[in-house]
Structure formats: structure tokens, C-alpha cells
Image: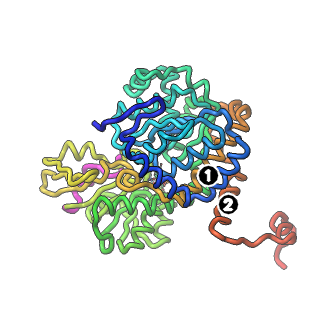
Amino acid sequence: MVKTVTGENYEVHDLSLAEKGQKRIDWARKHMPVLGQIREEFKKEQPLKGVKIGACLHCTKETAVLVTTLRDGGAEVFLCASNPLSTQDDVVAALTKEKNISVYAWHDMDNEGYYRSIANVITKKPQISIDDGCDLVTTLHKLKNGSKDPEIETVKKYGATADLMDNIWAGAEETTTGIIRLRAMAKDGALKYPVLATNDTPTKQEYDNLWGTGQSTIDGILRGTEELIASKVFVVSGYGHCGRGVAIRARGLGARVIITEIDPHAALTAVMEGFEVKPMTEAAKEGDIFCTATGCKGVIRLEHMETMKDGAVVSNTGHFSVEVDVVALEKAAVKHEEIKHMVDRYTMKNGKSIIVLAGGRLVNLALATGHAAEVMDLSFSDQALAAEYITKNKNDLKAKGGVVVDIPDDIDIKVATLKCKALGINLDKLTPEQEKYLSGWSEGTA
Ligand SMILES: NC(=O)c1ccc[n+]([C@@H]2O[C@H](COP(=O)([O-])OP(=O)(O)OC[C@H]3O[C@@H](n4cnc5c(N)ncnc54)[C@H](O)[C@@H]3O)[C@@H](O)[C@H]2O)c1
């Protein structure tokens, strides 16, 4: 079990890492100009004055830039991890020194520590929830409906009570899997407060999921394996936003890329973009490196791993650790060795071995440091403006009840426009004639 230190407003691994963490936060801040501009506006206007925000996010240097921005806008922020492996210990150590920010997170948390940290956020009575994967929202809802799940018993043990959900005005969700869970809750009538779908806004989905995941996933696989990608057969499961990014980057490094899909449109897109598409039963036999990016469970199962090449590398970049059935592999293996931190070799009865990266958890955040700051600049600007929007519109939003709400277009356009400016990208402007043409219907074949 990882040792932690606790104080009035924190539980982290090692406070002595704070100086290193602060340098990395400052580095990220330099690469997040849009969030920097929003921070300046927030400092002046204080749109979040007195608001309590509970955030369950990957605790990276970029997240530190987000939470300090929210704080500078007047909020009090309570942060916990959204994954047991994604916390950067130096970053959270640095955050303990910040006024009006509480942080409960460390790398390699056990289940009890993970839910104790969520409880530490819930008991501070947040009015806005910001999630990456929906664990804060579902914990609040399960508490409210009297669930007897072991995780709920843990949060109760640390003081969380059912009534605390009543303080929440609305939430914002960062990732695809969280949105899937929220829509399922809304459909069942289980969702009790509105949540903004930050993930679905173009400035998030088309950059963070695609290019952010593309680069950082390859980074995680390289740090884990130290292998050459060129000449390898690289199998990517799921050709959605994340999978497409991973496939494009793997091809760029010289791999022959095979896609597995369940959706005919996604499969066609992959083929049109020059990739092979095969079912996993076939791809399993050919691949050297595998990466799942589906948001689905049991994508790579024991029956697939049994047919893989000796030494095949298996990883996942989808939100939860259910895409690769590591549990079944563990049970079936005759030998398990840790090669190095987060890299395990399982030898099977047939004598072949499988290398599993990060125990099947998010490989880009567990083995590498997540997305580049330049990409998180967009996603976290969306999140900062979502928090401002919730605060300004809390009564209207509360009246909507348990629904998933789109981020207003003007937020998305503002973030994209500021990013273009920061990158020195100059756009053309529609002439009045063009505007009239695009909004009319009378001009046709001349
Ligand atoms: N690693 C990261 O940093 C990161 C970043 C953003 C999102 N995510 C997560 O990655 C996952 C994918 O997100 P996305 O935005 O790409 O979603 P998406 O909906 O755009 O794409 C998912 C794709 O997977 C396919 N799929 C579903 N089940 C499948 C199966 N059993 N076999 C093969 N293909 C299957 C779907 O048809 C779809 O094309 C989610 O869990 C999301 O939360 C991770």
C-alpha cells in the first residue's frame, strides 16, 4: 500500500515533491494560453465568487492549471483523482500549498483510498461537480438512493451522507464514458441533476480525444515497452475519436495498423482512411501491439489472448479497465512477473507470454503523463467556462432536472477563436454578400 500524508486540506503521497511539481505546473501553464486568458478574465470578474466546486479528475499538471484558474475566479475547489493510477504525485504535492484548493490524490491508490478521497470531496458540500468518468456523480446518486455497494459503504465510513447531493446545482463531464453513463442514468430516470456534456463539444472531442489520445497513448506504450513501432502490426480496437488518433499516430511511426470495430460507419471510415478492418479473432493472431479505445468491456478476452503471438503487448486507452480481460488472464496464467512498474508478463499454459501495460488501465495516464498541455488548453477552457455558465444559469439548469445538457455553442466558438489567436492563425471573414448567400435559399443554378 502506498503511504500518504494528510493535512487539513489534503491527502497526498509526498509533500517534498512540491517544488518539482510547481515547476511542471508552470511549464504546463505556459502552454495553455487560452486558459491563461480566461484566468485573467476570472481574476477581474470573479464569476465563481464563493462557489464550491468538487472535481474528480486525472490529477495532472494541466488539471492543476484548471483548478487554480477556477480558484482565481473566486471558487473553492476540492479535487480528487478520477483514476487510481493517473495522479502525478509532484503536482498534487504542489497543490497542497495553494489557498482555497484541497486535494486528495496519489499515484497507485487502492480502492479504499480512491473512495475515501471522493468522500473527502463530497463532505465539503460542492455546488458544482466536475467529473472525468462520472464516479463523483454516480457516488452521490448511489449514496442518495441508499445503495449497499462496498464503495458506498466506504464513502459513508468517511462521513459522506445522502443529503449532500442536494447542494449540487449541476455538473460537467469530461469524457465519453462518463457521458455514456450519464445518458444511461437519464434514460432510467436515475439522474437527479443536470450535467453539461463537456466531452461532446467540438473543442474537446475533436482535439483532446483525437490528437491528445493519439500522441499520449503512443507515449505510454513506448515508455512501457521501449520497443520500435516501425514494422510492427499494431491493432487498435475502436475507430472513434480516440482510436482514430492512436491508429493515425501508430501508422505515422511505421506500423501496419489493423482496426477492430462493431460499427459499420466507423469501419468504413477506417477503410477509406487506408486501414485494414478485421474481427478480433483474426487480428489477435497477427498483432504485435494491441490497444483498445472503445469504452466497451471484454474487447480483448482470454480466447483472443490465447491465440496471440508470444510476447504480444496488450494495452488500453479507454476510460475503464474493463476493455482487456486482465482478470481472466491472471487466473489462466501459470506465471506472472512484474518486468518493471506497470509492465507485467503473464505466461500461459501454451508456453506463450502476454505483456500487459498498466494492468489494462489508461495506458497514456498510467505509464505516461496524459495529454499535452496544448490540447488540455482547449478541454479545460471548456470546463472553466462550463463552471461559469453553471453558476450564471444555476436556477434555469436546476429546473431542467436530471438531463445531459450540451455546452452552448458560444463557449465552444470562444475557445476555438482564442486558440486560433494564440497560434497566430488568421481567418477570412464572410463578406455581407456571402453572409446573405449562406443564410438564404433563393440563389441556385445560374
Ligand atoms: N485515454 C484518454 O486520455 C482518453 C481521452 C478521451 C476519451 N477516453 C476514453 O476512450 C474511450 C473511447 O472514447 P471515444 O471518444 O473515442 O469514443 P467514440 O464513441 O468516439 O468511439 C468508440 C468506438 O469504439 C467502437 N466500439 C465500441 N465497442 C466496441 C467493441 N466491442 N469492439 C470494437 N469497437 C468497439 C464504437 O463503435 C466507436 O466507433 C472512452 O472510454 C473514453 O472515455 C480516453
Q: Nearer the viewer, residue 34 or 355?
A: 34
Image quarter of the N terminus = top left
**Location of the C terminus (image quadrant):** bottom right
Between 366 and 101, the one nearer to me in the picture: 101
How far separated are the C-alphas under marks 1 and 2? 10 Å
Q: What scheme was used to colour the molecule?
A: rainbow
Q: Is residue 306 visible?
A: no
User: Which residue in the structure is indicated by mark 2?
Assistant: 418
Task: Establish if 37 lies above or below 9.
Answer: below
Location of residue 202 (image quadrant): bottom right
Q: Are marks 1 and 2 in contact (CB under 8 Å)?
A: yes
Q: Which residues are magenta?
A: 296-310
SS assignment for the magenta stretch, majority: loop
Residue type, numbered disc 2: Leu
Task: Report how many numbered discs are placed on residues in the image.
Answer: 2
- Which residue, given by chain and number where applicable, does mark 1 sit on? 381
Mark 1 is surrounded, within 10 Å at the Cα level, by few (under 14), some (14 to 19) or many (20 or more) other residues, namely many
Q: Secondary structure at mark 1?
A: helix
Circle 2 sits in a helix, a strand or a loop, which is it?
A: helix
Where is residue 426? Give x, y as percent: 70, 72
| Disc on the earlier residue, 1 or 2 | 1
> Residue at point 23% right, 53% down?
340
